Image (cartoon, rainbow, N blue to C red):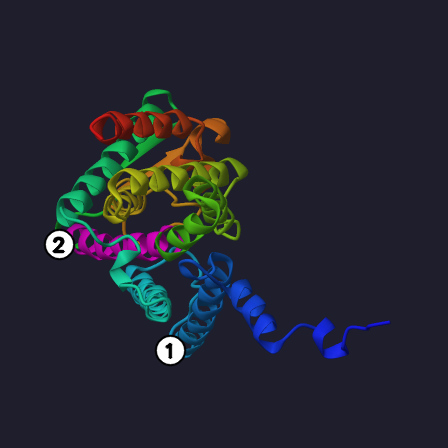
Amino acid sequence: MQTTPPEASQGSPARNGSALRRTFLGAQGLRAGWSVLLFLAIYQLFETAAMTALGHFVSLKPKGSIPPGLALIRESCEVLVVLSATSLMARIEKRRPLSFGYTGDRKIIRLLSGTIWGFVGLSVLIGVLCKTGFMVIDGRSLGGFSAWKYALAWGLVFLLVGIFEESLLRGYLQYTLSRGIGFWWAASLLSLAFSLWHVGNSGESPLGLLSLGAGGFVFCLSLWYTKTLWWAIGFHAGWDWGQSYFYGTPNSGLVMKGHLLTEHPSGHPLWSGGTAGPEASLFLLPLLILVAISMWIWWGRRR
């Protein structure tokens, strides 16, 4: 009776090597799942190193409101970390670093228009809250040179916040997950991650977290239509600047130092937003739907 040699039953080295290669590599290079895990590992390594080094010089968790100087230092480091991790992955995958959301034309126009949309959208929400009695504007807190100084400082901070958060959640990760599980599944997963990212913020609420997830999905929608992150970065910056500086409201439960106006919520937190700020108000959800419909009318129908 003929028997199969032991070495043949275990498979040839070439066949085993081919199977191992298929496990890690696909038609587009390193498979999406492995790419995502590698990116997250690199990002976490860079993030830990940067924050540990920064922690030797400044306190990363100040008591009370957050000063713009500290926020500027921290967000600059965050942008450097995420862009470094993205550039390293681009080099590994033989792609251009700018291909993850920063290509295309009309960059400045998209950035500026997104900023206007963000600030106007927030102003509409603030107007509704004031009109319905769920927010009261107390008056001005700053004037003269101080008002301009804080306006510029917070403007730069929130531009960096927009670049950091959009690059991290809707840059490399959105691009790579899309080639693995599809754009909209990736958008849903990363919008959930965007929401959970803010769980540790003091003063945040469950409704505020839901609104953040919905807002993240709107940002993904802008990426789908424009193929770039610039509009989302502008909207992110304009919205946050309006909350933290211009109107002086909490921003995802966080309070910033130096704001033009002062206000206080009134009535039930479900409508006023409470300590989380206006983005935790139920009024935000129909506003986000209106923004999404406007995007479809302006970009979708034209496409």
User: SS for tag 1?
Assistant: loop
Outermost residue toward the front in this view: 1
Q: Is residue 140 visible?
A: no
Separation of disc 2 and disc 1 at Cα? 29 Å
Residue 206 lies in magenta, yes or no?
no
What span is colored magenta in the figure?
147-170
- In the image, is 263 to the left or to the right of 21? left
In this picture, is 299 found above or below 111?
above
From the top left corner, tell me how far across and down residue 37 is, in percent: 50, 63
Q: Which residue is at a point 22% across and 52% down the rendered structure image?
A: 155
Q: Which residue is mark 1?
A: 57
Work out whether residue 124 or residue 16 is closer to the camera in this orientation and state it.
16
302, above or below 253, in the image: above
Q: Is residue 219 visible?
A: yes
Q: Is residue 166 magenta?
A: yes
Residue at far top of view? 132
Left or right placement of residue 226 versus residue 277 in this view: left
Q: Of tags 2 and 1, which is closer to the observer?
A: 1
Q: Position of residue 15 (x, y in %)?
A: 59, 71
Instruction: Tell me the quadrant of the picture where the C terminus can be found.
Output: top left
* Image quarter of residue 152: bottom left
Query: Relative to the observer, which residue lies in front, 114 or 199?
Result: 114
Q: Is residue 283 above or below residue 254?
A: above
* Residue name at image x 23 percent, y 33 percent: 120
Give left or right: position of 130 versus 35. left
Query: As displayed, is residue 268 above or below residue 94?
Result: above
- Which residue was labeled with disc 2? 145
Q: Nearer the viewer, residue 73 or 116?
A: 116
Which amino acid does the dot numbered 1 rest on?
Answer: Phe
Please state the horizontal and vertical placement of residue 263, each as a whole percent of the image.
34, 37
N-term-proximal mark, 2 vs 1: 1
Tell me whether the residue at label 2 lies in contact with that at label 1, contact meaning CB atoms closer than 8 angstroms: no
